Amino acid sequence: MQAQFEKQILNGSTISQDIKVSSDVVIIGSGAGGAVLAKELAEGGMKVILIEEGGYHPTSSHTDLPFDALSRLYRDRGFSASIGKPFIPLPMGRALGGTTVINSGTCFRTPAHVMQNWSQNLGLHDYNEAEFLPLFERVEKEINVTDVDFAVMSRANSIFHEILAKKGTPGKVLRRNIRGCEGCGFCCYGCPSGAKQSMDVSYLPKAFRSGAQAYTRCKVEKFKVQGNRVQGVLGKFLNSDDQPTGYLLEVSAPKVIVSAGTVFSPRVLWQNYVSRKNPKLKKNLGKNLTLHPANKVYAKFEEEVRGWEGTPQAYYLEEDPQNEGITFEGIFMPPDIVALTVPFIGQKLNQFMRDYKYMATFGFLINDSGTGNVKQLPFIGSTVFYSFNKQDVEKMKKGVAYLSRIFLEGGASVVYSLIHGHAEIRSEQDILKLENADVRPEDAECMAFHPLGTCRMAATEDKGVVGPDFKVFGWEGLYVCDGSVIPSSLGVNPQVTIMSFATKLAFDLIKESRPSP
Amino acid sequence: MADRILKHLIIALCENDTDILSQVDLAVVVTRIRNFVKKLPGVLYLVFYINLFFLEFALPPVVWKIRPFTWLNLQQKLDYLGSWQSSRFGLKRTAFELIKRTCLMHLYSEKTLLKHMGFGSVLTNRAAHSTQPGERHVS
Ligand SMILES: Cc1cc2nc3c(=O)[nH]c(=O)nc-3n(C[C@H](O)[C@H](O)[C@H](O)COP(=O)(O)OP(=O)(O)OC[C@H]3O[C@@H](n4cnc5c(N)ncnc54)[C@H](O)[C@@H]3O)c2cc1C
Ligand code: SF4
């Protein structure tokens, strides 16, 4: 049965006429940025229209097959990647709720030292711990950020905890946005029980109950512009094959907020030639991309670990033990997906798969230095370019070496890594070999989940694309608010930071819309 | 032709392990792969098939071999695929990974195979939480 709030969600693929509407605010994209804005602005009394390229997939439609989830909930069926050395798979969500529908639910506040950096280097003096405390608290309450219960933790994580505890240096349980999570381990494929408080089950229903309206399967390409003022958007409705149906959505609104995510917000701005009116934008638009490249190792134990039973990302090391800008976090891939990442073929691959029930895994992400960018290529569209620098490769080696040592000390018979030429690590000697190896960037195979920074926020336009008020420099009525405005790599998972930024913008806009007494 | 190459590739990736292959209908897996690739964005679709044909015909400059991949015996196939997998050239490894990952993802999403390999509890665990267990949206 359709819930009352679902009546506010209009499926673009079933619309067979052009539609013209108006609102106070139109938001492009419904992920961590867009959904929070929609709810806060609608509750603040503004008329909100939300436009999302992906479809609406309610909890009841999530199935038990990762492959199916890749097809429905991920952009490019989960095969998006950055080009460079190495090629880095860069999965992104495309659904009502954005990437939060397929994320792991881990929650961190923005580290204080990162905010200090923004203040010093980019002039963002209001972006500090004290100002953000009430924003963090509000977000965490909305999405119910809670410590993971040891009882539902994947054994792959608790093995790691036991080894560290024995050494006297335990890590901590992660905090996640969950309500009644039973640990089925399927977070990245759409939570089948609705426990994960992704945007589609937390913020968005509240937005809709307060009158916000969403058009799904609608892709925004053009702004309505007069001079340097944006006055609305034009979107194309898409059919179930992602092709335009031929019908258009036209929304007139004095405020347009682009929340299409770090890879696609620059595209929306480029498609509207924003830097023709303000050429200074060229310097930073699409640049300063950070990814938090992530890697992991597999460790084979004698016991049956069955890491798929329980929450896969539940435990972390608060501080990188070697203080190198590396954050270690639990991870476990279900067996139907893990084959993708196995660095073997033939009997070794078969044996790996047979042994997978005996394997624990643990991962890490590195605080990278922002060497990437997003470009708009003819016929291809938004394309991500990113290559490691020497420091990042060293961090990759260090992370793998650290985890390998922990697991071997803890009794693993072999550790498997994704660093080319170092796939099997059986002894301290193998670890030393890795540490001393001259690993090339293209040999450090990894993945990335947290693109940030392509419309960076800064106090002045020589350093950023948007100001501290989220307005695109040189434009009126045009804002960007999502991962793309986060000024630098965070070193921790970004969703709470993005949601807190969005809360700030919403509060500022509501204040602005109310006549001062 | 592409179906044939994909079939040979999957068999080679599993080193013709009948314990694994007897659990799946390869024709069905190949059809799923083809349907999946059909819906990839245009560029990826093209890259996938270009890679597949490079792999089959071993064309220079990527590699040079007189006999197509599907004509090789199992050991030759494994050696040949190994040379892609462990190539010094990152680009060549990536090209191979795209095809390998697509094949393995579809092979290992076969429930009978998962159960057979001892991952039955993955499925029952998920089914217990899911309102739509087992429904497959085949494209
Ligand atoms: C597998 C995975 C696991 C992750 N795990 C975690 C985690 O545990 N914790 C954490 O903090 N972060 C995690 N992340 C990252 C986090 O989910 C994202 O950083 C966050 O959701 C980004 O928010 P956003 O608003 O910038 O973009 P998104 O959430 O990606 O939303 C953007 C939306 O805009 C839509 N869109 C794009 N272009 C258009 C257009 N032209 N017209 C209309 N709509 C458009 C897209 O379809 C998309 O739905 C994970 C990411 C992945 C991929
Ligand atoms: S472990 Fe399962 S129930 Fe818990 S949040 Fe993830 S998908 Fe939902």
Image: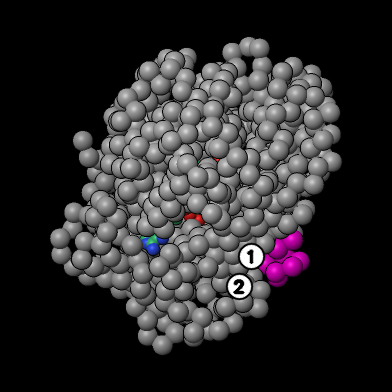
Residue at horizontal 74 percent and vertical 68 percent from the top: A121
How many dots with numbers?
A: 2
Ligand 1 is within 8 Å of the C-beta of the residue at disc 1: no
A420 and A109: which is toward the camera: A420
- Tell me the SS state at disc 2: loop
Asked which quadrant contains residue A28, the reply is bottom left
- Residue A95 visible, this angle: no
Ligand 1 is within 8 Å of the C-beta of the residue at disc 2: no
Assess disc 2: are there few (<14), some (14-19) or many (≥20) residues with their C-alpha within 10 Å of its C-alpha. Answer: many
Q: Are marks 2 and 1 in contact (CB under 8 Å)?
A: yes
Left or right relative to A408: residue A333: left
Q: Position of residue A517 (x, y in %)?
A: 47, 73
- Tell me the SS state at disc 1: loop
Asked which quadrant contains residue A288, the reply is bottom right
Residue at horizontal 50 percent and vertical 51 percent from the top: B59
Looking at the rendered image, the quarter that the C terminus of chain B falls into is top left
Specify whether disc 2 shares its chain with disc 1. Answer: yes
Single out the residue that lies furthest toward the front: B66
Q: Position of residue A97 (x, y in %)?
A: 40, 48
Instruction: Give the labeled residue for mark 2.
Output: A284
Instruction: Give the labeled residue for mark 1.
Output: A288
- From what the image shows, is residue A184 above or below residue B118? below
Residue at horizontal 43 percent and vertical 35 percent from the top: B71
Left or right relative to A227: residue A498: right
Q: Position of residue A261 (x, y in %)?
A: 48, 58
Q: Which residues are magenta?
A: A117-125
| Label 1 chain ID | A
Single out the residue that lies furthest toward the top: A303
